[in-house]
Image (spheres, helix red, strand yellow):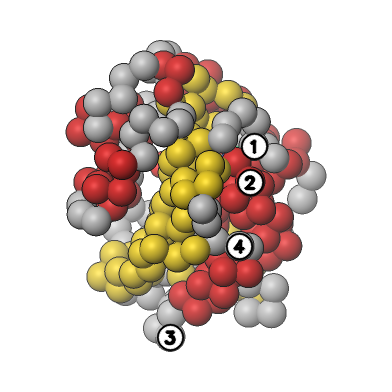
């Protein structure tokens, strides 16, 4: 899919929805030990970045999440959608920028990169691998990359307008690739082969992630939430 088509599709979704809310699940993950302790250690060693920040970064959520980091120069938010970025800029606390992260990550090196449910939005397995390389290189040695991704599992099922191709790992809506979904084992192999050190890797089977925004209530067959913390080796 052409990148301009992807931007247009995501922009249309944002234009249909009003203000930004942040993920409660991701927020609770970052605030819990041991992740919160690692983030406190990463505080003053370099800037922080959220990938796929949408129209409101999680870093806007107050000092409990940025652990006292308040200066605009410390906090960055990147997203592909110019509609989302323009809305995010209205909050004013971060440097927001429209970036296609699959092409590279400007600035840095960062001491912490947060994945705002961005990674599984990439359109193919090779794109995932390349993008993980960009993320690794954008981190300081010892820097942290953390987030949540959707995983497939043995009881997975999809809404009738979706089709999952088990060979390519791509989830389609009609003929449009909307997610790349892997099993927990496949995510683990991918993270390791991209060069990361795994510090935390927990599949939260009780947390279901809805692959489209057509539904609000999660169902048992939805993808499960995999929480990860990866580090760039020292
Ligand atoms: C599932 S949304 C999450 C948005 C927000 N973090 C939240 O939790 O509500 C994923 C975000 O990733 C962005 N995205 C997808 N592909 C991208 C790319 N190649 N480069 C930058 N951002 C991308 C989308 O525009 C979208 O805002």
Question: Marks 4 and 1, how far apart in space?
Answer: 17 Å
Question: Marks 3 and 2, how far apart in space?
Answer: 34 Å
Q: Residue at (46%, 29%) from the top-left corner?
A: 47
Q: Is residue 9 above or below residue 132?
A: above
Task: Tell whether 128 sits left or right of 145.
Answer: right
Q: Which mark is residue 137?
A: 2
Picture coordinates of residue 10, whole percent (x, y):
59, 39
Picture coordinates of residue 142, whole percent (x, y):
47, 49
Mark 2 or 4, nearer chain start: 2
Q: Which mark is residue 154?
A: 3
Q: Secondary structure at mark 1?
A: loop
Mark 2 or 1, nearer chain start: 1
Q: Which residue is mark 1?
A: 105
Mark 3 or 2, nearer chain start: 2
Q: Which residue is mark 4?
A: 195
Q: Secondary structure at mark 3?
A: loop
Q: Is residue 80 above or below residue 36?
A: above
């Amino acid at each position: 899919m052409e990148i301009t088509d992807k931007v247009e599709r995501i922009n249309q979704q944002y234009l249909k929805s009003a203000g930004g809310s942040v993920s409660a699940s991701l927020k609770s993950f970052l605030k819990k030990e041991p992740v919160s302790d690692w983030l406190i250690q990463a505080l003053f060693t370099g800037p922080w970045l959220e990938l796929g920040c949408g129209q409101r970064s999680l870093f806007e959520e107050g000092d409990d999440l940025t652990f006292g980091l308040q200066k605009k120069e410390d906090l960055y938010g990147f997203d592909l959608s110019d509609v989302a970025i323009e809305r995010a800029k209205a909050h004013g606390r971060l440097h927001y920028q429209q970036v296609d992260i699959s092409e590279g990550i400007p600035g840095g090196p960062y001491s912490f990169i947060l994945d705002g449910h961005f990674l599984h939005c990439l359109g193919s397995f090779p794109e995932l691998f390349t993008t993980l390389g960009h993320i690794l290189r954008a981190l300081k040695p010892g820097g942290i990359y953390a987030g949540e991704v959707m995983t497939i599992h043995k009881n997975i099922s999809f809404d009738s307008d979706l089709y999952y191709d088990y060979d390519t790992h791509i989830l389609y809506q009609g003929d449009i690739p909307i997610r790349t979904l892997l099993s927990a084992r496949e995510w683990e192999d991918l993270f390791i082969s991209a060069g990361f050190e795994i510090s935390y890797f927990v599949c939260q089977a009780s947390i279901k992630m809805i692959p489209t925004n057509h539904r609000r209530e999660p169902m048992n067959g939805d993808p499960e939430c995999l929480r990860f913390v990866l580090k760039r080796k020292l």
